[in-house]
Image (spheres, rainbow, N blue to C red):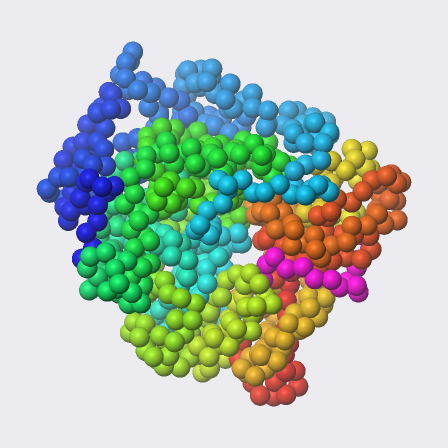
Amino acid sequence: MVNLTLGATVPIGPTISARLKDLLTKNNNDSNDLPTVEDYLSQENPPKFSGALGSGRAGQQLTTVPCANLKRQVPGSGPFVQCMSPGTLVCSQCLLVKYCSAECQKQHWKKHRKETCQSPLLDSESDDASQPQWVPAWFKEKRQPQFVGEQPESPVPRHLITNYNITLWGETPPVDLLNLEGNEGEVGRGYKICFARNQGGDIRNLVHTVNSLPEDFTGTLDILYHDQKTIQAGHTLLVLYALLNPELPIDEAAEFAVHLMYSAALTTPMAAYLYRCIHTIYGAFEGLDGNPFDDAHKGKTYDAKLPIRGGRTLEAVHEAWMLGLFLEQYVSDYKLKTAQRKMAKVMQNPKREDFAERFMVPLEGQHRVGITHFRKSGILLPFNVDAAHFDQPNRLMHGNMGEWFARHVAHPLSGWPVSHLRQSGLAHGALPTDIWGCFFFHVKSQFQEFARRVQKFNINITVATLPRDAIPQRIRDGKLGKAFQRGGGCFDRIDMGLIVDPHLRINDTLELWIPLLNKENPHAEMLMQINELAFHAETAAPNLSDLMITCSKALNLDLRRIGREGQTSPSLYRIMESVDAFHDNSDAFKTYFRGLGVERTAAALGVKARDVHRIHPQRHGVPVGSPEHTIPKLSSAEFYDLCECSSDAPPARDSYSPFFKSHIRQRRPSNAIRRIWGGRQSMKVPSVCPMSGLDLYLRTQRNSRNSAFIMISYADSQTLTNHPFEMNVIN
């Protein structure tokens, strides 16, 4: 058994304080009287954590948005604490916070007015709805933004570089990998699915797949969740165990898991329970004694079986040195201030201000306030909920020295559809303007449903962290758990996640993983996503005049006004980021993709790309099963939800701009652009503009609306004879 220690001083034993319940229910007038993590971990009798792991200061769960006012717990003395009465009145000025009474609103007004209502990020009333009152710094200062320009790019600041290569959150909406209704349609048989290479350290695809099972599902579902990135896999394992551990009520476990996955800090009880989960998990790896980095463990793999809800088992398979990396991260002893300082160096770096503001350009004023608040606090809560008691770092989000894992423009909204968030928020009293409060309640409700279904249905989950080539070989050898002991193909679905470099990875991926598809199931499929791809297609150039007019209407923008504002116009960059959402470049992409040689590899393996997708839509904004050339028809509000508010931040795409620039020629604007912009002959198209005159370099971007999704399935011999390789790709 691994001997865990917190820092270098406090051992994590098998039991924790029996005084926990008393300490949590005690009325503490001084915050210094609150128990520490060490208090929880150094006692003899195990506590009952139930009732302690909610988001409130005393461990209460949030079931609705509380009053925003902060009151002294004892009149005239003691700390300020949140008024937990349900909020029923809305601040009419900012439309972001709620109060339980006019009295609470008056008490809180001085603080609230200064911090929120007078925020420059909020839009003031304007007769021109197409032009927000807030503008980014580069436009006010009449300078070129940092993310474009002809000058050489400055080196990335050292504190923005980590050795972990971690993606905390996914960047595309969750996928139901089974979609039984559109495929097999059988609810009484067994299915095996594999998440083979995961895009981020969250579990949204797994959760969405389970939550989409029919209510009358009586079969079995065996899930293999593999992530080659050690830290991400450890993150996933801990979140799943915390959520599915039967020790906690489902509702409380779901709220705790939300913070594990999305918050940079935890309350003290949460941090204590996280250590308890760590001790349970890593003490369960059979045969692993002593230092995981010792030569005696080199190349060895260890398994752990953890009991979860419904009498099921959560299995974990890891190499010893990977376990060592986990433990280095989780038993570190840095303090919250260190973690906050290092997070701020990344998320609030003044040298990257333009990158952050570029994402905020299309947002509504309240949403700008919300994203700024989250980037500073790092804690996922409704906007007006006090987070002062989140006083421990979430060690799943930081390295062993407190390094912040996320990119400087990362935000978790990009992995969830905003329209769904609003619906969940309304059910819990959250305002649509408080998109982060809606997000909190949506993820919590999804986690609740996931835990209930794991408890109800026959679902088994295995989390593995092994080298890329090891999983297929272990499955062929029958050495990856009882559920996957078939030597040949066993998976009904394989999600390969993000293929970063299609030139090097797609053919290898097919050869390695296609033999693991279940040949007996005609619905067996593999899903791959291709990003960060640039290619030149001379024949794909659209009519730019029509395209820009269509885009400007969807964005509710005035092109002539953009022309008057010049090349630093914030609205110009909105069009540059959005114009490809209205262009069908599927034929050009197929031509490019065929040139990679995938056609020959697929034919040799007996697979083809589906003509009509059955799992994931061919592009976001259209239903599953739509013809490949379908272009989404979205209102301004729908476009905002799908492509601007919930898409990955534009700066994340531009962080790879040197790659794109090598494929994009800088040219003078075409006559079509000059005509639309009122004949401003001196205007130059910035070098990262996705269009160069009438020759368009089509590309898929790191964005939920225009990634390329490829569905590959086993093909019958007649289809292979007539059409050896048919691709249906939307980007």
Q: Residue at x 31, y 63 (%)?
A: 319
Stretch in magenta: 530-545
x then y, percent, for residue 253: 30, 47
Does the rendering let one see residue 449? no
Q: Is residue 539 magenta?
A: yes
Residue found at the far top of this picture: 76
x then y, percent, for residue 416: 51, 49
Q: Residue at x 26, y 63 (%)?
A: 295
**Which quadrant of the view contains residue 362?**
top right
Image height of 209 relative to 191, above or below: above
Left or right: residue 713 versus residue 150 is left
x then y, percent, for residue 158: 50, 41
Left or right: residue 345 versus residue 354 is left
Pick the quarter of the image with the N terminus. bottom left
Pick the quarter of the image with the C terminus. bottom right
Does the rendering let one see residue 720? yes
Residue found at the far left of this picture: 44
Q: Residue at x 61, y 51 (%)?
A: 656
Is 435 in front, or is 198? 198
Image height of 80 relative to 21, above or below: above
Residue found at the far front of this picture: 295
Left or right: residue 473 versus residue 373 is left
**Which quadrant of the view contains residue 483?**
bottom left
x then y, percent, for residue 531: 59, 59
Image height of 673 relative to 306, above or below: above
Q: Residue at x 38, y 36 (%)?
A: 339
Is 446 in front, or is 668? 668
Q: Is residue 379 magenta?
A: no
Left or right: residue 436 versus residue 273 is right
**Which quadrant of the view contains residue 350?**
top right
Is 402 in front, or is 157? 157
